[in-house]
Amino acid sequence: DIQMTQSPSSVSASVGDRVTITCRASQNIRSWLAWYQQKPGTAPKLLIYAASSLQSGVPSRFSGSGSGTDFTLTISSLQPEDFATYYCQQANSFRLTFGGGTKVEIK
Amino acid sequence: EVQLLESGGGLVQPGGSLRLSCATSGFTLSTYAMSWVRQAPGKGLEWVSGINYVGSNTFYADSVKGRFTISRDTSKNTLYLQMTSLRAEDTAVYYCARDLGSNYQISFLDYWGQGTLVTVSS
């Protein structure tokens, strides 16, 4: 299976900060990568798919980049509602795999 | 409006079985790949199983292969996950999720249910 490694596992940031989360795949997954946001007690929400495509309804402060094995999720100006856990997920294989998650906490 | 509603979770003893259901509405189940994803208490997301949009191919994580079976009944607009030989480590909230694109492979998950809790304990 393709392993997905996220870093950092947690980050403390303030409202207005720029936040960057990275995800590395154990093999080339081309652009078959998604990012999700999850808040406590709720289901994950799709933010970015195909590495850089913004899902409908998602604010433009979220952006994704990368291809191959290295990917980045950027929140350009952190808002109060963005404090959550973020996961990457590969879809290069039909057996999907998720990264371990990055918790974005209030500084 | 797309909706997914899981049911069937509960407390089961180790070695026992359980069948989860995911009732869908607002889209045509026969044209979308579907997945089950679980989350153990305080842990991250783990993809468990998927079925392609045709319904002809199923896929499983190594951790559940041979014990879990995914299926669907398009006449009832319902996705299922039959779980057998359950272990303590299967304890989790189980989500069903729909694929982003119709008539496509298992890929990105755009709609999720609210989840159903499965607890495996004696």
Image (spheres, coloured by chain):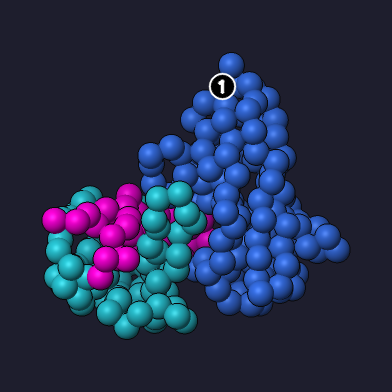
B49 or B113: which is nearer to us?
B113
- Above/below status of A73 relative to B47: below
Q: Is residue A62 visible?
A: yes
Residue drawn at x 43%, y 55% as measured from the top left: A97
Amino acid carrying mark 1 in the image: Ser
Which residue is farthest right?
B75
Q: Is residue A15 left or right of residue B15?
A: left
Q: Secondary structure at mark 1?
A: loop
Q: Looking at this view, is B8 or A100 the one in front?
A: B8
Report the magenta residues as a range: A79-107
Where does residue A61 sit, x and y in percent of width and height? Answer: 27, 79
Could you say which is closer to the camera, residue A34 or residue A20? A20
The chain drawn blue is chain what? B
Direction from residue B79 to residue A80 in the image, left or right: left
Q: Where is residue B98? Give x, y as percent.
A: 60, 65
- From this view, report whether residue B10 is shown above or below residue B31: above
Disc 1: which chain?
B
Residue A85 is one of the magenta-drawn residues: yes
| B34 is higher (above) or lower (below) than B45 | below
- Residue A14 is situated, as x and y percent measured from the top left of the image, at 14, 64
Which part of the image, by quadrant, shows the C terminus of chain B?
A: top right
Residue B35 appears anywhere in the view: no
Residue at (59%, 36%) from the top-left corner? Answer: B118
- For image coordinates 53% across by 43% down, the residue present is B93
Residue behind mark 1: B121
Query: Magenta span has B42?
Result: no
- How far across and down, in percent of the image, does residue B26 sit? 71, 73
How dense is the environment of label 1, judged by Cα within 10 Å: few (below 14), some, or many (20 and up)?
A: some
Q: Quadrant of residue A63?
A: bottom left
Left or right of A56 in this view: A61: left
Q: What residue do we see at 56% from left, 21% from top?
A: B121
Residue at the outermost top position: B122
